[in-house]
Image (cartoon, rainbow, N blue to C red):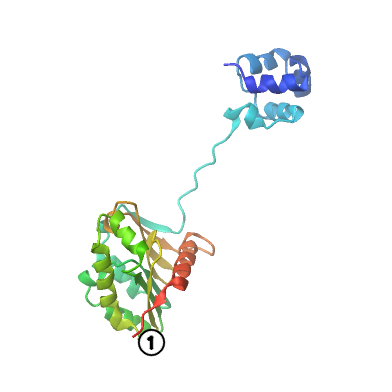
Amino acid sequence: MPNERLRAVMEAGGWTHAALADVTGVDPKSVERWVNLGRTPRRATALAAAEALEEDVHALWPALRQARSARAVSPELVALYGQRADLPVSAFVQLLSQAQQRIDVLVYAAVFLHEAYPRLNDLLRERADDGCTVRIAVGDADDPNVQQRGQEEKFGHGIESRCRLALLHYRPLAGVPGIELRTHGTTLYNSVYRADDQMLVNAHMWGINAYGAPVWHLRRHGDGGLFDTYVRSFDAVWESARPVES
C-alpha cells in the first residue's frame, strides 16, 4: 500500500526520490519503495528522512512507534484477590491488630467486619490505648452520593440502612481518646483499610457489590508510590467528612 503521507510531504517540499536518497544515504529505488510500496526504512534512516522533510517520523511511518513496555508488578503489591469474598475476615482483623501507629478505615458500611468479628470495637480501643491513632469514616446514609451507590450496586435503599447500621456499630467509639469517627458523602471508588504501612484496598465497580469486587494488599515501598496515592485519597475524604459527636 502506498505511503500517501510520505508522498504528499515530499511533493509539498519539492523532494525527489534521488534527493531524499542522497541525504539519507540510500539508493533512490529504496525511497521509491517507501513511497509506492509503503515499505518502512530502518529507524535511523527514517529519523534522518523525517528530519530532512521536517516531519514527525511516526506520522510518516506509524509502524516505528514503539509501544511502551508494560510496567513490572509494583513492589508494593503483596497479593491480589479476585473478590473480597475470597479474603477471610481474619485477614482484616490481623492487619488492624498489628497496627502500632495508625489505623485508617474508609468505607460506606462494611458491616461484615462487625458481623463476623464482634470484638472489632474492643480491638480498636486496644490499639488506641497503645498509642495508635484511629480514624474511621463511614457513609452518610442521607447523602445523595451514597444513595446513588445503592442504586448502582442493586442494593436500593439497603445501602442506607447498612450505613446507619455501621454508624450504630462504631458510635460507641466516638469520643474515645485516640479514635475519631466521621461520616462522609463522597463518591467512593475504593474502600480502604490501612494499618501503618500496610493496606487492604477493596475496589468498587459499577453494578457489583463490594464483596464481589477485587481486593489488593499493599505494603508501602518508599515514598510517593501507590500506597501513598491511596493515603492522599483517604486524607482528602477525611477533610471533607463530618465528625460524629459522642
From what the image shows, is residue 195 above or below residue 59?
below
Task: Report the quarter where the C terminus lies.
Answer: bottom left
The answer to which of 184 and 68 lies nearer the viewer is: 184
Picture coordinates of residue 82 (x, y %)?
Answer: 31, 52
Picture coordinates of residue 108 (x, y %)?
Answer: 33, 66
From what the image shows, is residue 18 above or below residue 234?
above
- Rendered residue at 59%/29% (across/down): 62
Q: Quarter-wise, where is residue 32 in the image?
A: top right
Q: Quarter-wise, where is residue 37 in the image?
A: top right
Q: Is residue 138 left or right of residue 39?
A: left
The answer to which of 237 and 18 lies nearer the viewer is: 237
The answer to which of 228 and 78 lies nearer the viewer is: 228
- Rendered residue at 60%/30% (across/down): 64
From what the image shows, is residue 129 above or below residue 155?
below
Q: Is residue 117 left or right of residue 130?
A: left
Residue bearing mark 1: 177
Tally the numbered discs: 1
Instruction: Let me know if residue 111 appears in the view.
Output: no
Instruction: Let me know if residue 71 appears in the view.
Output: yes
- Rendered residue at 46%/54% (across/down): 74
Picture coordinates of residue 94 (x, y %)?
Answer: 30, 70
Q: Element under label 1?
A: loop
Amino acid type at circle 1 is Pro
Task: Report the quarter where the N terminus lies.
Answer: top right
Residue that lies at the very extreme toward the top in this rendered image:
29
Count neighbours of disc 1 (C-alpha within 10 A) and say few if under 14, some if 14 to 19, many if 20 or more.
Answer: some
